[in-house]
Structure formats: C-alpha cells, structure tokens
C-alpha cells in the first residue's frame, strides 16, 4: 500500500517537509476504519495514534524532536484537503 501511496503527487513545497505524504495517507487510512469521519477526526486520531504505528509505516523520527514522528492535527487537515483526489483514487484502485 505504501508503494501505491508514494505515487501520489505531494502538493506541498518540498522545502520543510517533515512527514512523507505516503505515511500521512497511510495513517489516515488507518483512522477511517477506527471511526474518524472528518478531517478533524482523522488529524486527532493520527495525533493520538499508538507510538509504534508511524514508525511501522515508514515515518522517520526527527532528531531534534525525538518525542514522536507524527504530524500535528492541523497539518494533517491542511495536507489532506490539498491532496489530488483523482490521484488518490487511482493509486488506491490499483
């Protein structure tokens, strides 16, 4: 699944990206079956995700912020709102 999600174009400016798009999308995919029904709920679920989950999905810990490799809820909402829906649909469909 991560390989397919990595095919989706990242709408962000490459400078300053801290979280891979494929990891954020994989985390979001885990949030929906857990009951998240809005972008806010997805972001909150990701913020509260089990400690091991982001690393299992390929997130790299930040050496300056060793607490957790998950993006904040507000960043998740902004990113998910900007992702190309057609590209996401095509990647998941394959």
Image (cartoon, grey):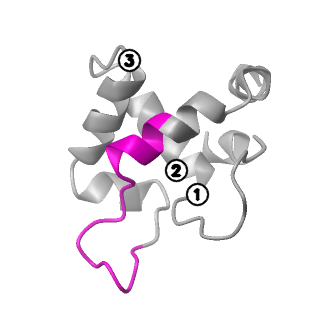
Quadrant of the rendered structure where residue 86 is?
top right
User: Mark 2 — residue?
Assistant: 23
Decide: is 83 above or below 6: above
Name the secondary structure under disc 3.
loop
**Residue at 27% over, 36% down:** 44
Asked if residue 23 lies left or right of residue 91, the reply is: left
Q: Quadrant of the N terminus?
A: top right
Q: Which label number is shown at residue 10?
A: none
Report, in whole angstroms, how far the alpha carbon at label 1 lies from the one at label 3: 21 Å
Q: Main secondary structure of the magenta part?
A: loop
Decide: is 47 above or below 28: below
Q: Closer to the camera: disc 1 or disc 3?
A: 3
User: Mark 3 — residue?
Assistant: 38
Q: Quadrant of the C terminus?
A: top right
User: Mark 1 — residue?
Assistant: 20
Circle 3: is it few (<14), some (14-19), or many (20+) Cα within 10 Å? Answer: few
């Amino acid at each position: 699944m991560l390989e397919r999600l990595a095919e989706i174009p990242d709408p962000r400016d490459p400078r300053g990206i801290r979280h891979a798009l494929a990891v954020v999308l994989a985390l979001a995919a885990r949030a929906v079956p857990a009951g998240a029904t809005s972008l806010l709920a997805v972001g909150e679920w990701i913020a509260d995700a089990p400690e091991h989950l982001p690393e299992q999905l390929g997130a790299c810990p930040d050496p300056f912020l060793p607490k957790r490799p998950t993006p904040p809820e507000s960043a998740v909402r902004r990113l998910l709102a900007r992702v190309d829906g057609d590209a996401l649909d095509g990647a998941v469909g394959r």
